[in-house]
Every structure is written in C-alpha cells, then in structure tokens.
Amino acid sequence: MEAASRAMPELASKPVSDEAIAGMDWPTLQAAVSSCTRCTLCETRIAAVNGRGAERATWIAVAGAPSQADEQDVQAITGEAGQLLHNMLKAIELKPEADVYITNVVKCRPPERNPSGDEVIACRPFLERELALTGAAMAMTFGQFAAKGLMMGPAARGKVMHYGANQLPVVATYHPDDLLRKPEDKAKAWADLCLAKASHG
C-alpha cells in the first residue's frame, strides 16, 4: 500500500502519451494542454495556451507560439493582433466565433526564441487532435514559423499547400503582429486570404 502511494505522484506527473491525446474530447484535451509536461517549456511557462473559437469549425487558424500577451491572457492571438485577425477573417465573410478555431503549433511560450524542433514534435499530437475535433476543411497559418511548423518542413506564401492524410488545404500568410509592425504587407496578406477563400469554395 505504501509503495502504491509513493508511485502515485510519479504517475500524476508522467507526460500524457500520443495515443491518449488521440482519443481525447475537448474538455480532456484542454485540461491536458494546461497541465502538459511533454517538453521543458513546462518549466518556464506562466501558462499553457489552449486554442479558442468554434469547436466544430470550417476553418482553423494556426499561429506559431503564444506571445507574451497571449500567455498573460491565456488566449491564442489576443489583444490588438487578435482584433486584426478577427477583422481579416470577417473580410473574407467568415464569422470568427462560429466558423474558425484559432490555435498555435506550440502551446507554451518559449523564452525569447522560436520553439525548437523537439518542442514542435512534443506539441504535435495536441494540434492533430484539434484538427480532428474541429473537422476543419481549410487551414491558414499566420507567420513563417507557423507555416513551417504545421507543414513540418518548407512552406511558402502564395500557393495552396496540402497537409496530412486528408490533404487539408493550407494557405500561409503574415502573423497579425507582423502586419501591425509593417502595415505595407497588408495587401499581400489580403491576397493570401482571397486565395484561401477561393480554394475553400
């Protein structure tokens, strides 16, 4: 009995497996993200950031990793960037709350750097489960890291890429934070949004 009780804390802190994540419903998935120990970012984060938006979504919007503001708000793409994203989606006649699920490739903010390959791989089952649960038929990535992180390799703006066994259409564009710093890129972002809208039908 004593040995069993000593083993319990170890069991509680054991990272959740890929197989377990693949069978999770939304509440279980969100709890698993919030308490995740699958990589060393759990040691430095303030909070893990779950996705937000429509749980049955037509589109999925994927950024790279939470910003400092996202981590503080515990919400994916928040603040002024979140408002700009909302406006971008509305501009192509999407209802952000009803049509779109917004998430990150990596759920914890790395300290002043892009996530490592190991961190992307550790978080991948969470993203795969979000894709499955939403049933999204179109993906947009926001920021260069998000595009490479989702595609797990080379990715480029200006074309429709395809991801996974279901060949999910993916279009890459700028992160709203980048557009706020460099508004002259908004015209190119608009072209990306139109390409995504046209490819989704």
Image: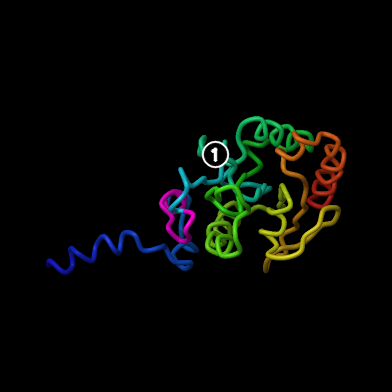
Question: Which residue is at the front of the view, 121 or 110?
Answer: 110
Q: Which of 8/25 is in front?
A: 8
Q: Is 32 displayed left or right of 189 in the figure? A: left
Residue type marked 1: Gln
- Residue occupying the point 58% across, 45% down: 66
- At numbered mark 1, what does the secondary structure look like: helix, strand or loop? loop
Is the residue 11 above or below the residue 192 in the image? below
Q: From the top left corner, tell me how far across and down residue 137 is, in percent.
A: 70, 54
Residue drawn at x 44%, y 48% as measured from the top left = 34
Task: Report the colour scheme.
Answer: rainbow
> Is residue 193 a member of the stretch shown in magenta?
no
Which residues, given as a range, are shown in magenta? 30-41
The residue that disc 1 covers is 75
**Residue 61 position in % (x across, y down):** 67, 47
Q: Tell me if residue 101 comes above or below residue 86 in the rendering.
A: below
Front-most of residues 180 and 60? 180
Task: List x then y, in percent, for residue 37.
Answer: 42, 58
| Label tally | 1
In which quadrant will I find the N terminus? bottom left
Residue 130 falls in image quadrant: bottom right
Left/right of residue 164 with respect to residue 13 in the rendered view:
right
The answer to whether residue 53 is left or right of residue 87 is left
